């Protein structure tokens, strides 16, 4: 029996939030790990980004398997991998290398939870329901990221950093019973293939798919870069202002900043449905570049002003991701969807891995985390992501044909 769109969307969105509990655990605790394990900025970038590298590498295989078999089986396997990796970090990680390997494995698990969940959603819905469900799903991603930040900060403060990863493992396991609410495979609605690896050529032939894939890559470059470096940057600014922080814990602020973007993400996605996604994504991307430039310029500026800008950046950097996700689902069909989503996640999370690492290298090359000029270059590097997203929307018919709707 076909389940209601609301039930399917709610179930997969809640499962996504639980499954991504590990995602921001390292960024939330980056300053603690930097002290505990004597990490430089490049190593912080590696630890923050390696999760997304695991995601990117595993994704083509997982989506290929989900296109050949029941996607729920792939989802369950991925959730178990994620739980294993998170529990192992809590039990065994005692330095940079152990944490690096285990976080890579955790990223492999999250690939199956996130993008296979998105495929399950797309296969069960269509039309406007599909577009709005994709916006809700990306909103759930943002909420899950914020919860991951907050949970890691609170649990580490109360019980030690290991508790944050133990809770992340529990979250991955809790996705399994929720998955049952999506119902059995739907005959005729889920495309099956004999291929174990997505045929990217079919997706790349579609210029609309390519456009949204590039936009997603640029988006995640910036989003994950700022998520990984949010806490160290706020700590730097607090010290530059002689410890003035208004009593706000940087980890809590980082988590709350994510929630600010959620309603705007849904609103921007809805505006995109009504007025055209391309121009909306283009405008939001340019706004994000501007905010990044001001943040870099005011890196050691007044704490309240910088905090306000960071909250605005949370909106501009993540606000258009719902419109981007809606675009990729709209541009793909049953024949191309598995390859399109695999390419979407592969490129997006590869950029999500490279963004935090590039920022870390920029900081090290510019004098280190204590230098204002280093943070200026950090935000210049972050802004490159939105430059890519804007260019993808302006490319060919996206701009020159007056932003024709996909």
Image (tube, rainbow, N blue to C red):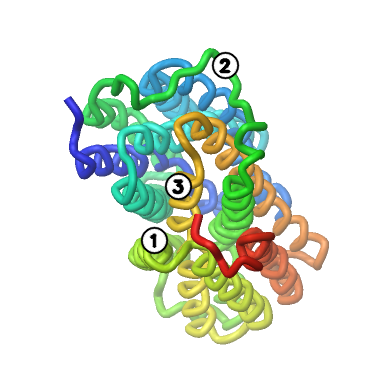
Q: Name the residue under label 3.
A: 330
Residue 315, position as x, y percentages in the image? 46, 69
| Crowd tier of the residue under label 1, counting other residues whose Cα lies within 10 Å: few below 14, some 14–19, many 20 or above | some
Q: Name the residue under label 2.
A: 195
| Crowd tier of the residue under label 2, counting other residues whose Cα lies within 10 Å: few below 14, some 14–19, many 20 or above | few
Mark on residue 273?
Answer: 1
- Give the left or right position of residue 290, taking residue 178 as reference: right
Element carrying mark 3 = helix
Residue 312, position as x, y percentages in the image? 48, 75
232 and 118: which is toward the camera: 118
Residue 127, position as x, y percentages in the image? 33, 46
Q: In which quarter of the image is the N terminus?
A: top left
- Give the left or right position of residue 355, taking residue 340 as reference: right
Pick whichever of labels 2 and 1 is earlier in the sequence.
2
Q: Marks 2 and 1, Cα distance to the nearest angstrom? A: 33 Å
Q: Which of marks 2 and 3 is in front?
A: 3
**Which residue is farthest top?**
194
Residue 203, position as x, y percentages in the image? 60, 37
């Amino acid at each position: 029996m076909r389940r209601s769109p609301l039930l399917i969307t709610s179930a997969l969105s809640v499962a996504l939030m639980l499954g991504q509990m590990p995602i921001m655990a390292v960024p939330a605790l980056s300053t603690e790990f930097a002290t505990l394990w004597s990490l430089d900025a490049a190593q912080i970038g590696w630890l923050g980004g390696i999760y997304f590298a695991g995601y990117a590498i595993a994704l083509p295989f997982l989506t290929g398997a989900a296109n050949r078999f029941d996607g729920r089986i792939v989802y369950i396997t991925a959730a178990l991998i994620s739980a294993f990796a998170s529990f192992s970090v809590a039990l065994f990680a005692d330095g940079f290398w152990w944490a690096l390997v285990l976080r890579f494995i955790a990223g492999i698990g999250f690939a199956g939870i996130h993008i296979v969940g998105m495929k399950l959603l797309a296969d069960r819905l269509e039309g406007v329901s599909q577009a709005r469900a994709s916006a809700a799903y990306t909103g759930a991603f943002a909420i899950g990221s914020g919860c991951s930040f907050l949970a890691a900060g609170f649990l580490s403060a109360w019980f030690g950093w290991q508790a944050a990863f133990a809770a992340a493992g529990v979250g991955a396991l809790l996705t399994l019973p929720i998955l049952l609410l999506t119902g059995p495979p739907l005959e005729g609605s889920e495309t099956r293939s004999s291929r174990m690896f997505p045929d990217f050529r079919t997706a790349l032939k579609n210029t609309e798919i390519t456009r949204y894939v590039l936009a997603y890559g640029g988006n995640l470059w910036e989003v994950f870069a700022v998520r990984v470096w949010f806490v160290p940057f706020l700590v730097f600014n607090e010290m530059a202002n002689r410890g003035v922080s208004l009593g706000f814990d940087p980890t809590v602020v980082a988590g709350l900043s994510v929630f600010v973007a959620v309603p705007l993400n849904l609103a921007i996605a809805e505006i995109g449905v009504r007025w055209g996604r391309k121009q909306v994504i283009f405008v939001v991307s340019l706004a994000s570049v501007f905010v990044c430039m001001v943040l870099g310029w005011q890196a050691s500026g007044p704490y309240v002003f910088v905090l306000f800008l960071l909250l605005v950046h949370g909106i501009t950097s993540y606000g258009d991701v719902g419109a981007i996700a809606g675009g990729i689902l709209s541009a793909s069909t049953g024949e191309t969807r598995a390859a399109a989503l695999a390419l979407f996640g592969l490129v997006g999370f590869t950029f999500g891995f490279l963004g935090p690492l590039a920022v870390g290298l920029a900081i090290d090359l510019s004098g280190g985390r204590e230098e204002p000029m280093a943070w200026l270059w950090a935000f210049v590097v972050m802004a490159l992501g939105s430059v890519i997203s804007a260019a993808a929307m302006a490319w060919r018919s996206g701009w020159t044909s007056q932003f024709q709707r996909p």
